[in-house]
């Protein structure tokens, strides 16, 4: 049986970056994936992911976003690929909504360059948007998008160059923790490793009963719209935009607001991506969850008609993507409860922007090294009582 220092299950976002980090540090690494990443079955497809630094969800994220930006630029140099592009990022909603008030708090506290704009100012700068008079927007100019498929290919290429063994189309069926390590059985063979990282995204619950209690796959209906007039929605003209729109007594949105976002077209003849970020259905990446319901498309139509009217009536395609949600919407990074050698990673629907740093942080965790960033808030121990 072949033996490794580390076995990584899942070569998507978290897994590919961790393989790169560990292999570059000189460890013997085996990475396994049931498919051949990048692929369109999990959480990392769809051409673009937003990258921003003002992060209402907590200070750790801001520090991580700042470090990640540098690491994306470094990966671009190492791989010779263009991975990150500046577009600006708008957070829009009523001034007291959590996203916008949190944006301002985070930007001020961490001295992130930003502007605060009235509805009128937004519409003057970007006539593509239509805002109720009482809406405001926070603009972060030094924000943008990363290209996820290219990024994962870069992580995997770098890991291979650093001598990682990466096996694709080889699903993990079972793992067993031993006194001094782990044993992993796949569809093809068995392997031994010192430590194991489960970075299986939306399939996490299949791999450990203990994870299934806190990690829920959510299905996102991603709508791709072909604008009639391309220029206003193209790169350089159209910032990434995230909206928090108040709703009253809607059981689908118990938080009291709808959250949706859109990202620019990446090339002529391309499409705008629009999706909801909350009110999501539970999903299963192996089942019919890939089918999008008519009511989901109707809700997107309503949002477009109200807030992006230039897109109303334009041809639209849909596909599914998955978040792996934790109960508090923060990441899950660390050792599985009651385990010595088995670790898990789940990114709660907003992890791509941090991928190169997450690779470093997870490698540190697997090596029992102190973390350069305070990641206590992501510890699985916070769910011990659930
Ligand atoms: C529509 C959408 C938009 C998003 N937008 C943003 C954004 O703008 N900004 C941002 O930062 N984040 C965003 N995210 C979130 C981000 O993309 C995810 O947090 C991230 O990709 C999750 O990475 P992962 O490694 O957990 O999962 P994946 O990248 O899906 O990787 C998991 C891998 O595990 C493999 N696997 C599973 N089970 C097994 C097994 N038994 N054996 C072997 N392999 C297995 C899978 O095949 C897969 O390749 C978005 C997500 C979606 C769906």
Image: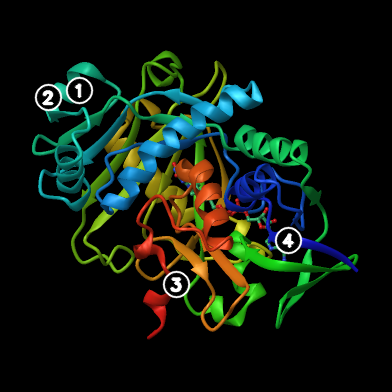
Verify CB contact (< 8 Å) between mark 1 and mark 2. yes
Q: Position of residue 365 (x, y in %)?
A: 52, 61
> At x 79% / y 49%, what residue is drawn?
166
Residue position marked by numbered label 2 in the rendering: 120
Question: Secondary structure beneath disc 1?
Answer: helix
**Mark 3 or 2, which is nearer the eye?**
3
Which label sits in the foreground, 4 or 3? 4
Task: Name the secondary structure under disc 2.
Answer: helix
* Quarter of the image where the C terminus is located: bottom left
**For mark 1, what is the residue?**
123
**Mark sitting earlier along the chain (4/1):** 4
Q: Which residue is mark 3?
A: 380
Viewer-proximal residue among 306 and 259: 259
- Relative to 34, is 108 on the left or the right? left
The Cα–Cα distance between marks 4 and 3, rounded to whole angstroms, is 23 Å
Q: CA distance from mark 4 to mark 1?
A: 55 Å
Nearer the N terminus, badge 3 or badge 1? Answer: 1
Whether pointer 3 and pointer 2 mark residues with C-beta atoms closer than 8 Å, the reply is no
Q: Which disc number belongs to residue 344?
A: none
Q: CA distance from mark 2 to mark 4?
A: 58 Å
32 is higher (above) or lower (below) than 114: below
Residue found 46% across the figure and 49% down from its top: 351
Q: Is residue 100 above or below residue 313?
A: below
- In the rendered image, which residue does mark 4 sit on? 5
Task: Label 3: state its secondary structure.
Answer: helix
Mark 2 packing: few (<14 Cα in 10 Å), some, or many (20+)? some
What separation in Å lies between label 3 and label 2 (alpha carbons)? Answer: 44 Å
| In front: label 3 or label 1 | 3
Mark 1 → mark 2, Cα distance in angstroms: 5 Å
């Amino acid at each position: 049986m072949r033996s490794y220092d580390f076995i990584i299950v899942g070569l998507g976002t978290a897994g590919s970056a961790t393989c790169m980090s560990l292999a570059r540090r000189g460890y013997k690494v085996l990475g396994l994936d049931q498919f051949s990443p990048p692929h369109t079955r999990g959480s990392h497809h769809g051409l673009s992911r937003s990258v921003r630094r003002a992060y209402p969800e907590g200070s750790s994220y801001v520090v991580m976003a700042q470090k990640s930006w540098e690491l994306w630029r470094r990966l671009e140099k190492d791989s010779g690929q263009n991975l990150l592009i500046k577009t600006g990022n708008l957070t829009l909603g009523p001034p007291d909504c959590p996203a916008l008030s949190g944006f301002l708090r985070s930007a001020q506290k961490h001295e992130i360059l930003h502007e605060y704009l009235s509805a009128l100012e937004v519409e003057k700068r970007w006539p593509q948007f239509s805002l109720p008079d009482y809406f405001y927007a926070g603009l972060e100019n030094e924000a943008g998008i990363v290209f996820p498929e290219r990024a994962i290919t870069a992580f995997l290429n770098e890991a291979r160059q650093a001598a990682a063994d990466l096996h694709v189309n080889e699903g993990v069926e079972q793992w067993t923790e031993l006194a001094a390590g782990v044993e992993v059985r796949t569809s093809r063979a068995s392997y031994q490793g010192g430590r194991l990282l489960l970075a299986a995204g939306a399939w996490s619950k299949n791999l450990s009963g203990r994870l299934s209690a806190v990690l829920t796959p959510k299905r996102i209906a991603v709508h791709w719209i072909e604008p009639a007039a391309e220029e206003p929605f193209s790169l350089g003209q159209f910032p990434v935009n995230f909206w928090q729109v108040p709703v009253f007594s809607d059981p689908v949105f118990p938080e009291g607001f709808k959250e949706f976002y859109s990202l620019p077209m990446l090339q002529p003849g391309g499409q705008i991506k629009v999706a909801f970020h909350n009110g999501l259905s539970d999903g299963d990446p192996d089942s019919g969850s890939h089918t999008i319901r008519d009511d989901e498309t109707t809700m997107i139509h309503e949002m477009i008609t109200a807030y992006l009217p230039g897109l109303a009536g334009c041809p639209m395609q849909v596909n599914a993507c998955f978040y792996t949600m934790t109960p508090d919407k923060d990441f899950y990074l660390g050792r599985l409860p009651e385990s010595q050698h088995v670790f898990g990673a789940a990114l709660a629907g907003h992890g791509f922007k941090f991928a190169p740093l997450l690779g470093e942080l997870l490698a540190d965790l697997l090596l029992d090294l102190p973390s350069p960033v305070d990641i206590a808030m992501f510890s699985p121990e916070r769910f011990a009582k659930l």
